[in-house]
Amino acid sequence: MKYGIVAFPSKKVQDFANSYRKRYDPHYSLITPHMTIKGVFEADENEIKIIAEKVENVLKKHTPFSLNTSKVSSFAPVTNALYLNINPTEELVSLHDDLNSIEYNDVESYTFVPHITIAQKLSATEHDDIYPQLKMIGVDFEEMIDRLHLLYQLEDGSWTVYETFRLAGDE
């Protein structure tokens, strides 16, 4: 089964992202707007229980972090995807690194770029048409994230929560 670890932003940020995702993201109906902290990995029922324990132990050492968006950016020319850029704070990068130190059945293939996708799988023309417009809008959101979610993918391709973890910071 496929799993991943994400942070869900507030409803306000989700509503903003969804205002674009409805039209420009074919995965709109499969997953809520999110920031991926640990990308997709495979695990069976026994493995995921062990991984979930390790995730919980890592998160006990981390405090809530600030999620700050600053602008709309693009992954072009690698892929025609647009996203809300999230400022990579020291706390967020450390959290990502610690979660990725856990042994998973995967190989991390991308550099960590904290973001919330708002458009993907665009044609080159569509990308070149909407990206300049979106770059000009203000995307200033700031909020605290105090929990992460271990998700799994259902047979229909949608994602749902397996377990939620609070960022405790050794309370």
Image (tube, rainbow, N blue to C red):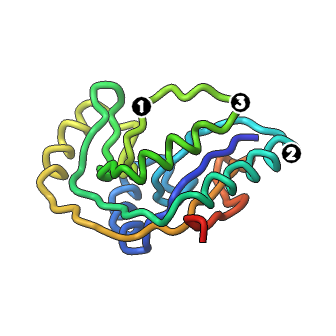
x, y percentage for residue 10?
43, 72
- Camera sees residue 136: yes
* Image quarter hosting the N terminus: top right
Three-letter code, disc 1: Thr
Q: Are marks 1 and 3 in contact (CB under 8 Å)?
A: no
x, y percentage for residue 82?
31, 44
x, y percentage for residue 118?
36, 52
Three-letter code, disc 2: Glu
Residue at x 32%, y 34% (from the top left corner): 80
**How many residues crowd around disc 2 within 10 Å: few (fewer than 14), some, or many (20 or more)?**
few
Residue reaching furthest to the right: 46
User: Which residue matches tag 3?
Assistant: 105
Q: Is residue 169 above or below residue 52?
A: below
Say which of 77 and 107 sits in front: 107
User: Which residue matches tag 2?
Assistant: 45
Q: Earlier in the sequence, mark 2 or mark 3?
A: 2
x, y percentage for residue 145?
46, 67
